[in-house]
Image (cartoon, coloured by chain):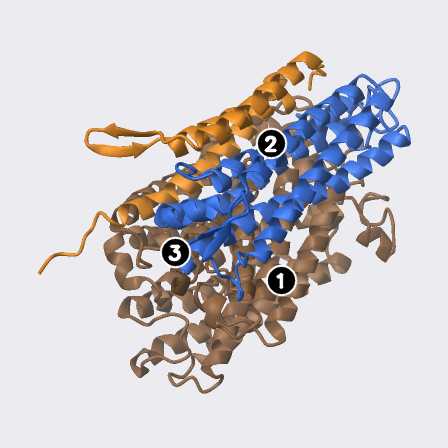
Chain colours: A blue, B orange, C brown
């Protein structure tokens, strides 16, 4: 036999309770989990990427309609939401930090804060969607983009090709809707983490799920970091 | 993966920069960044907004997501993802940007 | 045969449906894709029967449209894409790496369930009313004008896509993190390189078709306008997004097959693979280049001619790494000690037929020629030469090669050789006439044709019936061999590779002791041969 074998049947001296049997040690398991999450996030980049491609094409073709559509969005809600998500990224990073230090109470507090901030984001988003509904800016049978409500409450008339405007709003709802779905899934994942933290499942030697779900949460934040300028800030020159 | 514990003050610094950049990008959207280059009016608003967004995303990836402290394998995965997105966007746009090159002949 | 192995380790339906063993999951996939292959084959049978006469008397035009859609969707998404990766990859990859399992066994099982869910929903959509858009779902027909189950069919593929993504993710992490001690990247079998490259494509490409199908469903349900020209949408944008995945998808389908061939040839030529590194890197090159050529499906769709020229040039470039593989396989055969066992017969078939299919790909990569043959039977023949003449033969070759490892038993060699021959002859009779038909101008996806094309169509249909017999035979004798086949032993082929160092069938954890690798891949040196005998 040309390949000789070595007996490596037992894992290291103190097998960790969380070590799965097909891994040789916790470090391999942790590395694998981390890499798995990063590869998954790359699939998410491409998933959102398809919508970005459609956005790019139509913004190039229908710039005027996109400017008007963008102006009809409430920039304060958008900016506040961006700030909210950035705060939630900080609290998430602090949650991972606490987990790595074995600080259970801090971990729980930061997880709850992250979830609260996520909830605020979704609440503001719901309000924005409601406003669009009232103004008939939701694509479909009742779509009519001939006026928009300005921040001071006044109505401004809009004259633009309805098809082009509808495409802008379709992309707006698709992009933010898909993002919101990912946020909701994230809230679910954070709930699971919260329960596991409460049940003392994590310690400084094992906190991989906290780390990896943290990566997911930051990714969802990054998507919004791009959505904010692409959807809300197309051109606000001369307008408020 | 080396269990590198990032100091809290780095997190807070990154957080502060991210917030500042958010105000910046929102504010710049109201400023007309059109520049006259060789007779053409080139609007730099989109480019600036995108650059700020890329800068913010980079900070999140490097520090909040720990890429600065990761193995090269992980970094390659991230770079590959971004690169592939660029392939999708750029090659698709070669079609749309060049459709106008051929104008119909005038009879 | 060993007393306890992964098949008799546990009994009962629960032990299969809740298994985390990659070997059992591979078998679950094998059964599932065989089922979907039969469904797709029934579609093909009805198509070829209808095309026996020029006047389309067997089925109506609407039914014919549903038939080729069923055939395409089943074969592409539910047979070819999962075939080698999910069946042979799942079974062999951890064994080849010296690992106990893949990195995420539970996710592996989940991927199978997702596959079944998507496949069941798709089957329901295709059979209860059907879909008539073709597997390509072109807009605005699919989004506006079709009256069939488009949304359900699209969403079913969306679901099945996650199965592909999870498999790819699992294989990437497994290859990076689960190799046995001593197995460096360049000591890995080439099948692993191919599977790894395939996994990269699965992970990067599938999400794009996922979002594209979501957009189709949204457009169809809510008329959002994104692909509808009446609202300013561009139907060609759909094609860009669809083919961004679907072209790399054809490399998902063929790369694993190439990996199988790279295992079979050194073994049955008793020679180390010539140019190992070239073959390894060519797999990666195919994966990368495969992503920048999709526009060649849109040559006559209305894209700019400049864009078309760029894609045409790049499409020539993507042929180069494939050609490199063919050269290296040929060089490996040269002065080898060839044994004509069934896997090798399939490998020969693959090399010949894949080369023809690939060369005709160069024909259609030429803008000027594609204008004439696009949407004709020439294209159909081109991709069937690669997918059936290439991929299905590689799959069957792999099944026969690893059958002793999977089941512990040998298949009957005489029947297997006969089947390979029948398949080869049936295949060529089916598809070679289609090159001629396409060149003469017969369009695809029509249930009728001008009467002067009848002779060639009849030849093609006759070939299809022979091909069907060829596929039926392995189904019978492979099942027979599970009970009555000759007991195989650890390494019936005398092949190199870690999977052959363990028992046939392997124990649940693959290896009694974790192997340590010191040899190069494909060591068929004289010293080793002497030691083996």
The answer to whether residue C297 is left or right of residue C492 is left
Cα–Cα span, label 2 and label 1: 31 Å
Q: Name the residue under label 3.
A: A159
Q: Name the residue under label 2.
A: C529
The answer to whether residue A103 is left or right of residue C94 is right
User: Tag 2's secondary structure?
Assistant: helix
- Residue C335 seen anywhere in this rendered image of the structure: no
Name the outermost residue toward the left: B107
User: Contact (CB < 8 A) between labels 3 and 2?
Assistant: no
Q: Quadrant of the C terminus of chain C?
A: top right
Q: Earlier in the sequence, mark 2 or mark 1?
A: 1
- Residue C4 seen anywhere in this rendered image of the structure: yes
Q: Which of marks 2 and 1 is in front?
A: 1
Is C103 or B95 nearer to us in this picture?
B95
Q: Position of residue C104 (x, y in %)?
A: 73, 38
Q: Quadrant of the N terminus of chain C?
A: top right
Same chain assignment for discs 3 and 1: no
User: Contact (CB < 8 A) between labels 3 and 1?
Assistant: no
Q: Mark 1 points at which residue?
A: C474
> In the displayed structure, would residue C259 be above or below residue C224?
above
User: Tag 3's secondary structure?
Assistant: loop
Quarter where residue C382 is shown: bottom left
User: Tag 1's secondary structure?
Assistant: helix
Label 1: how many residues lie within 10 Å, few (<14), some (14-19) or many (20+)?
Answer: many
Residue in view at x 23 percent, y 55 percent: C368
Chain at numbered mark 1 = C
Is C335 or C172 nearer to us in this picture?
C172
Q: Where is residue A77 in the image (x, y as percent from the top left)?
A: 60, 39
The answer to whether residue C269 is left or right of residue C476 is left
Is C206 or C364 nearer to us in this picture?
C206
Name the outermost residue toward the right: A199
Q: Where is residue B22 in the image (x, y as percent from the top left)?
A: 54, 28
């Amino acid at each position: 036999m040309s390949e000789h074998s070595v007996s490596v049947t037992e894992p290291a001296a103190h097998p960790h309770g969380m070590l799965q049997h097909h891994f040789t040690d916790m470090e391999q398991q942790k590395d694998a989990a981390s890499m798995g999450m990063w590869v998954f996030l790359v699939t998410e980049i491409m998933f959102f990427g398809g919508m970005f491609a459609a956005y790019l094409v139509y913004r190039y073709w229908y710039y005027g309609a996109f400017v008007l559509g963008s102006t009809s969005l409430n920039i304060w809600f958008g900016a506040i939401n961006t700030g909210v998500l950035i705060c939630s990224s900080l609290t998430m990073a602090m949650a991972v930090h606490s987990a790595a230090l074995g600080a259970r109470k801090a971990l729980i507090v930061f997880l709850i804060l992250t979830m609260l901030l996520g909830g605020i984001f979704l609440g503001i988003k719901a309000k924005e969607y409601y406003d669009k509904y009232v103004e008939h800016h939701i694509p479909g049978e009742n779509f009519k983009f001939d006026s928009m409500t300005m921040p001071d409450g006044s109505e401004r008339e809009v004259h633009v090709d309805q098809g082009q405007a509808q495409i802008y709003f379709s992309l707006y709802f698709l992009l933010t809707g898909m993002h919101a779905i990912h946020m909701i899934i994230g809230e679910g994942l954070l709930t699971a983490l919260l329960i596991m933290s409460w049940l003392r499942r994590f310690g400084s030697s094992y906190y991989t799920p906290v780390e990896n779900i943290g990566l997911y949460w930051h990714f969802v934040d990054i998507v919004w970091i791009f959505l904010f300028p692409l959807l809300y800030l197309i051109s606000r020159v001369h307008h408020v | 993966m080396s269990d590198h514990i990032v100091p809290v003050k780095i997190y807070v610094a990154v957080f502060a920069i991210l917030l500042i950049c958010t105000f910046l990008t929102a504010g710049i959207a109201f400023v007309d960044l059109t520049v006259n280059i060789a007779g053409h009016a080139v609007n730099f608003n989109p480019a600036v907004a995108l650059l700020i967004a890329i800068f913010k995303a980079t900070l999140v990836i490097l520090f909040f997501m720990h890429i600065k402290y990761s193995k090269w394998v992980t970094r390659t995965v991230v770079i590959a993802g971004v690169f592939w997105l660029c392939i999708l966007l750029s090659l698709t746009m070669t079609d749309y940007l060049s459709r106008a090159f051929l104008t119909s002949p005038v009879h | 045969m060993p007393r306890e192995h992964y098949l008799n380790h546990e009994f009962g339906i629960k032990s299969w449906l809740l298994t985390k063993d990659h070997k059992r999951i591979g078998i679950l996939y094998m059964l599932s894709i065989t089922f979907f292959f039969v469904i797709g084959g029934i579609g093909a049978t009805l198509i070829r029967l209808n095309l026996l006469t020029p006047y389309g008397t067997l089925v109506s035009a609407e039914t014919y449209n549903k038939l080729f859609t069923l055939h395409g969707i089943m074969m592409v998404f539910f047979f070819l894409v999962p075939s080698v990766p999910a069946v042979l990859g799942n079974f062999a990859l951890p064994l080849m790496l010296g690992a106990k399992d893949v990195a995420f066994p539970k996710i592996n099982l989940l991927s199978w369930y997702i596959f079944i869910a998507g496949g069941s929903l798709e089957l329901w959509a295709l059979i209860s009313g059907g879909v008539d858009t073709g597997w390509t779902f072109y807009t605005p027909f699919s989004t506006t004008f079709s009256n069939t189950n488009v949304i359900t069919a699209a969403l079913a593929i969306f679901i099945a896509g996650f199965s592909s993504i999870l498999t790819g993710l699992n294989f990437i992490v497994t290859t990076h993190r689960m190799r046995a001690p001593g197995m460096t990247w360049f000591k890995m079998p080439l099948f692993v390189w191919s599977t790894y490259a395939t996994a990269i494509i699965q992970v990067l490409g599938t999400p794009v078709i996922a979002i594209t199908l979501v957009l189709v469903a949204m457009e169809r349900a809510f008329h959002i306008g994104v692909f509808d020209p009446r609202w300013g949408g561009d139907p060609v944008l759909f094609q860009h997004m669809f083919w961004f995945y679907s072209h790399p998808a054809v490399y998902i389908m063929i790369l694993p097959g190439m990996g199988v061939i790279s295992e079979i040839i050194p073994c049955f030529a008793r020679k180390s693979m010539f140019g190992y590194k070239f073959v390894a890197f060519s797999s990666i090159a195919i994966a990368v280049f495969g992503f920048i050529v999709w526009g060649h499906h849109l040559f006559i769709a209305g894209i700019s001619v400049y864009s078309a020229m760029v894609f045409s040039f790049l499409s020539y470039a993507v042929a180069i790494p494939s050609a490199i593989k063919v050269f290296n396989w040929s060089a490996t055969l040269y002065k080898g000690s060839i044994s004509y066992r069934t896997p090798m017969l399939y490998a020969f078939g693959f090399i010949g037929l894949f080369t023809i299919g690939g060369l005709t790909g160069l024909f259609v990569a030429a803008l000027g020629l594609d204008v004439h043959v696009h949407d004709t039977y020439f294209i159909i023949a081109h991709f069937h030469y690669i997918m059936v003449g290439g991929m299905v033969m590689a799959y069957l070759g792999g099944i026969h090669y690893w059958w002793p490892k999977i089941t512990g038993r040998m298949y009957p060699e005489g029947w297997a050789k006969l089947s390979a021959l029948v398949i080869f002859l049936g295949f060529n009779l089916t598809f070679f006439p289609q090159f001629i038909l396409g060149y003469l101008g017969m369009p695809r996806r029509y249930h009728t044709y001008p009467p002067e094309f009848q002779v060639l169509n009849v030849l093609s249909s006759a070939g299809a019936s022979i091909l069907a017999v060829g596929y039926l035979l392995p189904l019978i004798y492979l099942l027979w061999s599970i009970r009555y086949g000759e007991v195989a032993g650890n390494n019936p082929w005398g092949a190199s590779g870690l999977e052959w160092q363990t028992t046939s069938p392997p124990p649940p954890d693959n290896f009694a002791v974790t192997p340590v690798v010191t040899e190069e891949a494909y060591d068929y040196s004289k010293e080793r041969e002497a030691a083996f005998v």
